[in-house]
Each structure stands twice: as C-alpha cells, then as structure tokens.
Amino acid sequence: MNGVPATVPDADRRTVDDLVRNLPGGRPDEMSFDHPWEIRAFALAVAAHTAGEFDWQLFQGTLVDSIKDWESTRYPTADESWSYYRHWVSALEAVMARNGAVDRAALKNRTAEVLAAPPNRNHHRAILEPVAIDAATIAGPT
C-alpha cells in the first residue's frame, strides 16, 4: 500500500527495541508504554527522524513546549488527563506540519474517519500494516 512495507525490517525493529530498553528512569520489570499506540507514536518519531524528516533537538524542544503549555493550565499530579505520549504525538504533529510533511487539516479529517470507523473485532491480533479503513464500513450518504 503506497509503497510502504507491511513489516518492519529486523534492523529497524532492533533499533527501536534498543531505544525502548534504554529509556531512562525505568526499572527492568516495568513497561515503558502503557498502551500499544504509545510505542507506535515512539516508533513513528524515531522513523521520521531517521528518514531525515526533522531535527531531533527541534522535536525535543517542541515536546518540552507542549508539556510546559499543558502544565501552565493544570496541576500535573492532580489531573487525570496527563499523558506524556499525547504530548509526544502533539510535538510530532507540530514538527511534521512545520516542515510540510503533514497537512494538519488532512490529518484532522483522517483522524475523524478512523475514529468514526467501527472497532476491529480482531483487536487481540497484532496488525503490522498502516491503519486503513475499508470504505464500505464507513456510514454515510450513498
């Protein structure tokens, strides 16, 4: 689909696995990610940076700014809406939009389509392909 391989090359997978294992602050028996989408967001950022889509320091600065903006309006330890990886995704969207790799309006529309699609009944199986929606499952005028 669009020239994107359905599987991740072993070398790339090992690189991401090594990055995850070496994240600071974790203990060996703790998971670094609470939800599957978080590791996907992490891997997307690593892949985009590796492909030369953005400078890592720019991404880090944008991530810090996103967190600071959130903290300026909320008390982090008391607010249940805190999610480090939501800020990660926000920063990734911002740097990718800034360099023209992502159109924010198109991303917003695509997000709405994905969220409107019925859930996958086979959610317990790993899916290695990019997110795709069968047009026949989207409710709408015919």
Image (spheres, rainbow, N blue to C red):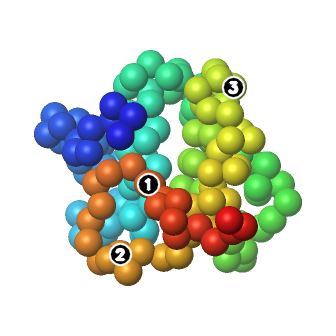
What residue do we see at 39% from left, 64% from top?
A: 36
What residue do we see at 85% from left, 60% from top?
A: 73
Q: Earlier in the sequence, mark 3 or mark 2?
A: 3
Residue corresponding to mark 1: 131
x%, y% of residue 24?
38, 49
State the image quarter where residue 120 is shown: bottom left
Asked whether disc 3 touches disc 2, contact meaning CB atoms under 8 Å apart, the reply is no
Residue corresponding to mark 2: 123
Question: The disc labelled 3 sits on which kind of residue?
Answer: Arg
What residue do we see at 44% from left, 30% from top?
A: 48
What residue do we see at 79% from left, 49% from top?
A: 69
Rate crowding at label 2 as few (under 14), some (14 to 19) or many (20 or more) other CA atoms within 10 Å: few
The residues tagged by marks 3 and 1 sit, at their Cα atoms, a distance apart of 23 Å
x%, y% of residue 118?
53, 75
Disc 2 secondary structure class: loop
Disc 3 secondary structure class: helix
Residue 124 appearing in the image: yes
Is 8 placed left or right of 107 in the picture?
left
Q: Nearer the viewer, residue 26 or 89?
A: 89
Residue 27 appearing in the image: no
Classify the position of the C terminus by image quarter. Answer: bottom right
Question: The disc labelled 2 sits on which kind of residue?
Answer: His
Looking at the image, which residue sits at the far bottom? 121
Is 106 placed left or right of 22 in the picture?
right
State the image quarter where residue 65 is shown: top right
Vertical order, 110 against 19 (above or below)? below
Asked whether disc 1 touches disc 2, contact meaning CB atoms under 8 Å apart, the reply is no
Foreground mark, 3 or 2? Answer: 2
Q: Which mark is residue 98?
A: 3
